[in-house]
Image (spheres, rainbow, N blue to C red):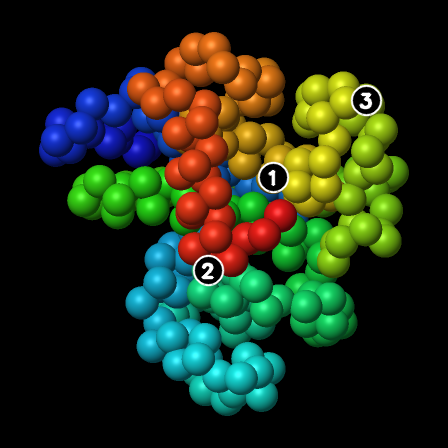
Amino acid sequence: MMQAFRYSQSPYSIRDDLSAAYRAFWSRLASPGSWWTGAERVAIAQESRHAVKCRFCAERKEALSPYSFAGEHEHAGTLDPLVVDAIHRIITDQTRITQSYVDDNAGEGLSKEHYVELAGIVVVTFSIDEFHRALGLPLEPLPDPLAGEPTHYRPAHAVAGTGFVPMIPADGNVGQEADLWPEGANANVLRAFSVVPDAVRDWMLVGNAQYLSMEGMQIFAGDTGRCIDRMQIELVAARVSSHNECFY
């Protein structure tokens, strides 16, 4: 079992909902997912931490083309090199990931469903880790994985054609996927992980606490439940997006 992380080391007051969201994600991370076992999911999260310090990634980031730069990642040695490379690219050089890269990975055994679940784990783990780094806190220990096999669940109505990977259509939040987004809130960014519905749920779980809930996004001038107002929130979000070259 994983012990609850204590925020007493922080000089800042940290909201309870943030800690609760992180606890819930770590618990889900440890369990088998749709396409990866619990042990593989925890290993993916661990590898995302190696990527931050990978010297090969830092050198490749400076290369004119990341696809012609040879070398080897610094990694834990527990995952296939193809998987390691995908994790490291998402962390260090995501703006140069291409359709052909995702397609080629699928041809070599890293299916698009596996890739989406991997990306979801990496994005949420990195978001939590960056929260700790920003406050000068140690990273939380990863949970012990639970036994079991992946479900291999894939929504039958997920289709290709919009992004690099299949997604549920804008009106596809029905049946088992009815909870993924509210009616009318179906932007591509919300649907990006939807071929693996639990990846959307995990991302929303932490995003609701770190940023705003879907309902909170409709509050432009009132109380957001945060210590800064909506204009300040969006100023910070825009600055971070610009720094990360996220122009969505």
Q: Tell me whether the residue at label 2 lies in contact with that at label 3, contact meaning CB atoms closer than 8 angstroms.
A: no
- Observer-side mark, 1 or 2, equals 2
Quarter of the image for residue 3 reads top left
Alpha carbon separation for disc pair 3 and 1: 17 Å
Mark 3, Cα crowd under 10 Å, few <14 / some 14-19 / many 20+, is: few
- Element marked by disc 3: helix
Give the residue drawn at x 48%, y 52%: 242
Label number found at residue 241: none
Alpha carbon separation for disc pair 1 and 2: 17 Å
Residue under label 3, please give it: 175
Q: Is residue 126 above or below residue 225?
A: below
User: Does residue 131 appear in the picture of this structure?
Assistant: yes
Alpha carbon separation for disc pair 2 and 3: 33 Å
- Element marked by disc 1: helix
Label number found at residue 199: 1
Give the residue drawn at x 83%, y 42%: 158
Q: Nearer the viewer, residue 163 or 22?
A: 163
Residue under label 2, please give it: 91
- Element marked by disc 2: helix
Measured as percent of width and height from the top left, residue 7 is found at 19, 29
